Amino acid sequence: MFNSLKLKRMKIQSIYLFMLLLFISCTEKIEYVNPTWVQQLLPMNSTQIKIDYFDNETMQEFSWVQREGATYTLMLDVDENFGDPIRYEVGAKASYKITNQEFLDDLKKLNPSFKNSGRFFWKLEQRNQGKVESVWRYFDALVSVSSFVDPRDQEHYKALQFVLPGGKLVTMMSENLRATVYADGTAFPLPRKLAPEDSPAAIRNIAGGFYSWGTVVRDEAIAREKTLAGKNIQGICPDGWHVPAFAEWKEVINYLGPHSGNKVKNPQFWIQNGSITDEVKFNIVPSGFYWNEGLSFLTDPGTMCGFWTSSPALKGYQYSWETLSSDRSGEASAVIIYNDPGNPDINTQSRSSAGGGNFHYNVRCIMN
């Protein structure tokens, strides 16, 4: 009996000692394996580096542990082989800084097709007393846009970015366009309209401009040709941006998923159903629309809002409640959001574009 109790105590003590040693070993600081090796610090491996497209002067920084007596070369390339890298001779320094503009220019030299996102590799070469060592990592570069200024009128706009399944980056205005002329200074065929004075002041300030489809795409015949060819239509948008095609709006809607409308509505202005969140910060208000069929212009604020796409109503388009079996002459594709708790989605429909004045909707532009 005595031996059995003694054996149990010894087992407990052994377990306690093992746990104590394990705790000490886990909390002990682990030094870099060899204090002379080349050692990168930032950016970490698999890091996402955001580069603000409209902020040319902000610096991007690469850093490492500076060894005594060592000099360094930083290299960038599109793969880990570093067959034809861009080289920066750094000397006896522990970091290298480069402006957003220079960084973007160099990434485009490495990969001419790089526009808004891509993977790149950086290697650090260390030379110390005749010994040369190197180590590499990779990073994902993302062209970031949170706001921009339209050069034609100095209007300031906020923007949102989505990385769609498959890696495509979409940069879209999170405010309604307010332009009064085309980017080249040409006047609109039909002037911009604004929300009426009797609209709620908060909505009137956010609503922006209301435009006919012909004004939005600038040339209706060319718009059809470009849509069929899959080309961007700048139309009413600033340089470097374009009017979203029907397919591009659909990509955003699919990305947002079920109840997409509730995710983009400003909850201050819509009928609440407990699920309106504006979680993506699109800040969409029920600004209404303008309509003209030989009557004076009318608006219907508070019940809905609409956005033009650059696409005519074409055969095969799948709208929210129908699929077109043939082209609809004199109609274009629009995105509609209703102030209806029973309809929490972003809807797609065709709307009349005949005569240039039937419907006036808002516009959100997409960056090229």
Image (cartoon, rainbow, N blue to C red):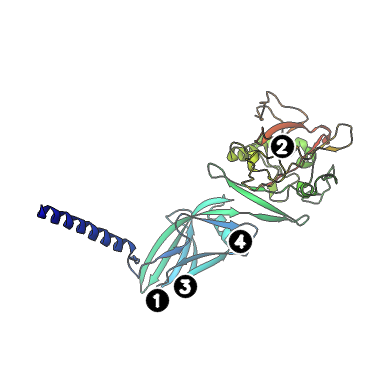
Between marks 4 and 2, how big is the CA–CA gap? 43 Å
> Tag 3 or tag 1, which sits nearer the N-term?
1
Q: Is residue 26 left or right of residue 186?
A: left
Q: Which mark is residue 339?
A: 2
Between marks 3 and 2, how big is the CA–CA gap? 62 Å
Between marks 1 and 4, how big is the CA–CA gap? 32 Å
Between marks 1 and 3, how big is the CA–CA gap? 10 Å
User: Secondary structure beneath disc 3?
Assistant: strand
Between marks 2 and 1, how big is the CA–CA gap? 68 Å
Q: Which mark is residue 91?
A: 3
> Tag 1 or tag 2, which sits nearer the N-term?
1
| Pointer 1 with pointer 4, Cβ within 8 A | no
Q: Is residue 178 above or below residue 136?
A: above
* Mark 1 residue type: Gly
User: Secondary structure beneath disc 2?
Assistant: loop
Residue lying at 14% horizontally and 54% vertically, measured from the top left: 5
Answer with the quarter of the image where residue 29 lies.
bottom left
